[in-house]
Image: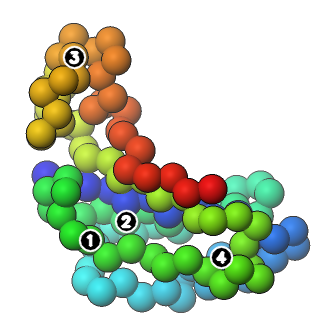
Amino acid sequence: MTVALMWEARALPGRGAELLAWARAQPLAGSPARRETLRAPQDRVLVITWWDAPYDAELPELPEPDEGLVARAVHRWRFESADGDEGRPAEGDESRSAEGDGDQSARGEADRSVE
């Protein structure tokens, strides 16, 4: 199974380049199948890592940057691949509809979000 971890932070105004450099420089304990760093308006940085692991596996994540660099706490999400699993509920969540209405397995599911 493929799991994607998403890490998103918003820098203090004018410090987006510094946050981007900080995120790129952060090592992970372990090697993801893929790692991508993206940026967006409002000095936001997004790091996505893909892992060949079960959804609930213990996976390394980027830490929180120093408070003086970010405007708010980091947001984090965990998604599992839905490719090849259309209509199948995520493991351990039989309450989801296989018909698709209300089924979040195809869209992903927020693991946690801290504001």
Q: Earlier in the sequence, mark 3 or mark 1?
A: 1
Q: Residues within 10 Å of mark 1 (few under 14, many from 20)?
A: some
Give the alpha-carbon distance from disc 2 to disc 4, as whole Å: 15 Å
Depicted 92 relative to depicted 39: above or below: above
Mark number, residue 49:
2
Q: Closest to the observer: 115 or 19?
A: 115
Q: Is residue 45 visible?
A: no
Q: Earlier in the sequence, mark 3 or mark 2?
A: 2
Give the alpha-carbon distance from disc 4 to disc 1, as whole Å: 22 Å
Q: Is residue 22 left or right of residue 83?
A: right
Q: Tags 3 and 2 in contact by the CB under 8 Å rule?
A: no
Mark number, residue 20:
4
Secondary structure of the residue carrying tag 4 is helix
Depicted 114 relative to depicted 19: above or below: above
Which residue corresponds to the image point at 25% horizontal and 83% vertical from the top-left? 30
Residue 51 x %, y % = 24, 64
Give the alpha-carbon distance from disc 1 to disc 2, as whole Å: 10 Å
Depicted 89 relative to depicted 64: above or below: above
Q: Callout 3, which amino acid?
A: Ser
Q: Earlier in the sequence, mark 4 or mark 1?
A: 4
Residue 82 x %, y % = 23, 37
Secondary structure of the residue carrying tag 3 is loop
Which residue corresponds to the image point at 39% horizontal and 73% vertical from the top-left? 61
Q: Earlier in the sequence, mark 1 or mark 2?
A: 2
Mark number, residue 59:
1
Secondary structure of the residue carrying tag 1 is loop
Mark number, residue 97:
3
Give the alpha-carbon distance from disc 3 to disc 2, as whole Å: 28 Å
Q: Nearer the viewer, mark 4 or mark 1?
A: 1
Which residue corresponds to the image point at 37% horizontal and 65% vertical from the top-left? 49
Q: Nearer the viewer, mark 4 or mark 3?
A: 3
